[in-house]
Image (spheres, helix red, strand yellow):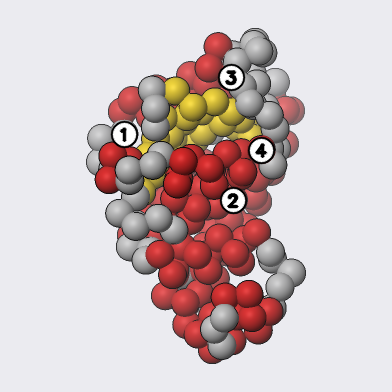
Amino acid sequence: MTGIITGDIIRSRKVGDPEEWMGPLKTLFNTLGSEPGVWQFFRGDSFQLEVKNVDDVFKVALKMKATVKCIKELDIKLAIGIGRKNYSAPRITESNGEAFIYSGELFDKMKKKNLAIRTPWDEFDKQMNLYFDLAVLTMDRWTQNSAEIVKMSLDSPDLTQRELGEKLGITQGRVSDRQKRAGFEEMLKLEKRFRELVEQNLQSYDTVS
């Protein structure tokens, strides 16, 4: 089983230099593997990324959302697919399997959503997509400050609020306020629940398979 994220940058033309958003995303993508086998941009502002540890898929999506929302006016659309990978090509856009099909087909159908998932598990999809619909009500409203604190908190989970504040040049209290406005604690709870449900479904899936 693997995770595939297909996405694109919303309002990318608002930014004159695409490297402003592409550079930070490439840095994130490189922590998961190299281009073009694990990730690849296409059509300018679209991309596909493989997350081999499917437990991590939602956490990666959160990091991607925060990374892009750090840039004024930009947002990101993400279609997550979890499933089998039947064929590995030198370029991820040429690889195939149900995870790719789920992600690609879902992406094409997402007209008004910015985050959704499709897997072999219908009940899981129903539950998680409801959670995602609720979560994006907060995520889509992240300011640059909110996105920045979410990104830093996810990238450095061992840092205290005081230490995060020192890196940002703000007080511990302001770090706490920014995390609260961003719904950071709730995002962590959702990420934990995502992992739990994925593990439950993987166990039953492997048994059936």
Q: Secondary structure at mark 3?
A: helix
Name which residue lies at 41% across and 39% down.
Answer: 18
Residue 196 % position (x, y)? 65, 51
Mark 3 or 2: in front is 3
Can residue 142 be seen in the rendering of this structure?
Answer: yes
Compute the Cα span from label 2 to label 1.
20 Å
Report which residue position mark 4 lands on: 30
Name which residue lies at 59% across and 50% down.
Answer: 59
Mark 3 or 1: in front is 3
Looking at marks 4 and 1 on the same chain, the residue that comes earlier in the sequence is marked by 4
Q: Amino acid at mark 2?
A: Lys
Q: Does 73 sit above or below residue 178?
A: above
Name which residue lies at 59% across and 64% down.
Answer: 152
Residue 186 % position (x, y)? 51, 67
Looking at marks 3 and 2 on the same chain, the residue that comes earlier in the sequence is marked by 2
Report which residue position mark 1 lands on: 110
Report which residue position mark 2 lands on: 59
Instruction: Tell me which corner region of the image, top left, top right, bottom left or bottom right, holds residue 78.
Output: top left
Q: Secondary structure at mark 2?
A: helix
Residue 205 % position (x, y)? 67, 29
